[in-house]
Amino acid sequence: MRSIIICALLAGVAAGAAPAAPTPMQILEKALSIHKNVKDYTATITLSTNIPGLELPTRSAKVYVKLPDKVYVESAGVFPVPRRAVLFGGISDDVRRGVTASLMGTKKVNGQTIYSLKLVPKPTDANRIAMPQSIAVWINGSRWTIEKVQVIMGSAVVGTAQFTWAKVGSYWMPTRIVASAPKEVIGTGQSGTLTMTMSNYQVNVGLTDEFFAQHQRRPTPRRHGHPHPQP
Amino acid sequence: MKLLTLVSGELTKMFRQRGTYAGYVLLAVFVGLFLWGVWAEGPPMSGPQNAFGPDFVVGGKAVSAPMVPYLLLDIIPVAVNVFIPLLISMIAGGLVAGEAQRGTLRTMLVRPVHRWAVIVAKAVASFLHAATLVLFMGAVSLLGGYLVFGRGDIITFKDGLVVLPEPQALQRLAIAYGLTVLTMCSVAAIALFCSIVFEHPLTASGVTVGFLIVSAALMVIPYFEWLSPYLLTTHFHGYRQAFYREINWPQVWYDLSYVGAYSAAALGLSLVIFCRKDITC
C-alpha cells in the first residue's frame, strides 16, 4: 500500500515537473509569431522554375518588403515573386480565416522536435472560397520555423513547399523555398517546381510607405473597353 | 562580275527614285506612331501581371525594346501583312513594266547581256529592297524601343507564358526578321513576274496586291478550306515560330518550302516569259 502511494506521488511530482506539451494551436501561433518583430526587410531573391507552360530564365532581383502588405521587386526583366511567401502570410492568412489545428505526430530529427500539424479550415464563407480541404504543416520545435507545408485536396497532395532557414541577426529568415506541384495539378503530364533562394537579407532597415508609393507602377492609360491589368 | 554590275545598276536605278525612299519614310512614321501608342496606351496584349495573377508581385517592365519589333511582327502584323508587301509591289512591280513604259527596256537589252541575267539582276535588286524594308522596320522599332523603354525581355503567351531574356530575345528577333525577309522575297518575285506580264507598273503592283488579298480572303472563306494549305498567305507567318519556347524548325521549313516554291515558280515563269518576249518598247 505504501509503495503504491509513493509511486502515485512520484508520478504526480513527475507530471507537475515536466513542461506541459504545447497544444497544436500554440505550436502554430509560436511558429507564426517568429517574424512579429520584423517590420521590413530587403533581400536578393534568385528564382528558378521548371514548371511546364512557364518559361522563365533563372535570374535574381532585389525585393523590398514592408509587412504586412507592401512588396516592391527591383528587376530589369520580368520577375514574379509569390506575394504570400515574402510577406510570411501563407499560413497566417489561413489561420486568420479560422482553422482547426490537430497534432498528427512528433518526430526527432537531429535532436530537434518536428511537430506535424493538420489544419482544417472552419466552414466559413471566406474559407469556402480560399482554403483547400486541409493543410499539413511541419514545424521545428526548437526554433519554431515552418519546415514544410502540404496542401491537400481530398486525399491528394496538390502542392508542397519546403523551407530552409538561416539566422539573420536575431531572426530566422527563409533562405530557400522550394514549391512543387504534381503533374495532375499542372495538367501537362509533368510536375513542376519553383525554387526561390534568398540572400543578402537586411532586416528592419526602415522602409517607408512613400518608398513603395514612389515605386508603384504608373497606371497605363487605356482606351475604353481595354481593361486595366489587375493590381 | 557582269551580273554584279547589273545588280548594282538596278539598285542605282531603284534608289534614284524618290518613291523608294518614301517607303522607308512611311515605315519610320508608322513605327514612330506605334511606339507612341505603346508608350501612351500600354502594350496591345495583357501583361505578365495578368498572367501570374494577384498572388504574385511581378517586377520588371511589361514593355521593353525587344518587345516593340516583336509586337510589330506577331501581335499587330499589319506592316508585314499589308504595308511592306504594298511597298515591295510598288517598287518590284515597276522594275520591268516601268522600263517598258519609259521605253528604256529595249535600249537596255541592246547591250551584250543575256536576258536571264537582266531578270536575275532585277530579282536580286527587288529581294534586297524587300530585305531592307523588313530590316529597316526591325531596326527602327528596336532602336526606338531602346530609346523609349530601355532594355528588357520579350514576353509571349505562346505555349504558356514564355519570357525570353534580352540576349535570347535579340537572337529570336534576328531569326524572325530573317524569316520575314525570305517571306517578303516571295512577294517581290511575284511582283517582278507581274511586272513582266503587265506593261504598266501600276497594273503590276495592283495585281500583286490583289493576288495577296485574294489569297488572304480564301484563307478565311470556309468553302476554300481545302485550298488553304497551298496559299502563300497561309505560310506568311512562319516567323512566329521564333517566339515559341522551342522553335519548331520542321514547321518553319514547311512554311519556307511553300514560300520558296512560290518564289521559284514566279522567278521561273519570269525567266521563261522574259527570255521569249518580243520587246517592242
Image: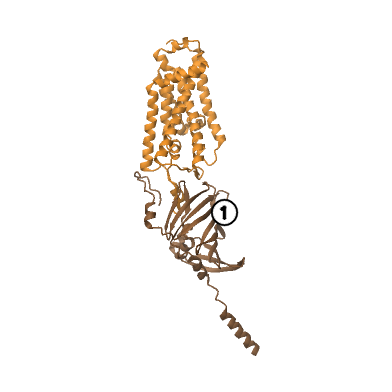
A173 lies left or right of A7? left
Percent x, y for residue B163? 49, 44
Percent x, y for residue A175? 53, 57
Using the image, determine if residue B79 lies above or below residue A90. above
Quadrant of the rendered image containing residue A13? bottom right
- A205 or A84, nearer to the observer: A205
Q: Label 1 belongs to which residue? A: A182
Three-letter amino acid code of the residue under disc 1 = Pro
User: What's the chain of the residue with tag 1?
Assistant: A
Callout 1 environment at 10 Å: few (<14), some (14 to 19), or many (20+)?
A: some
Q: Quadrant of the N terminus of chain A?
A: bottom right
Q: Is mark 1 on a helix, strand or loop?
A: loop
Quadrant of the rendered image containing residue B252? top right
At a point 53% along the width and 48% down the height, the residue shown is: A58
Using the image, determine if residue A42 lies above or below residue B123. below
Percent x, y for residue A59? 51, 48
Q: Is residue A220 visible?
A: yes
Which chain is represented by orange in the image? B
Q: Colour of chain A?
A: brown
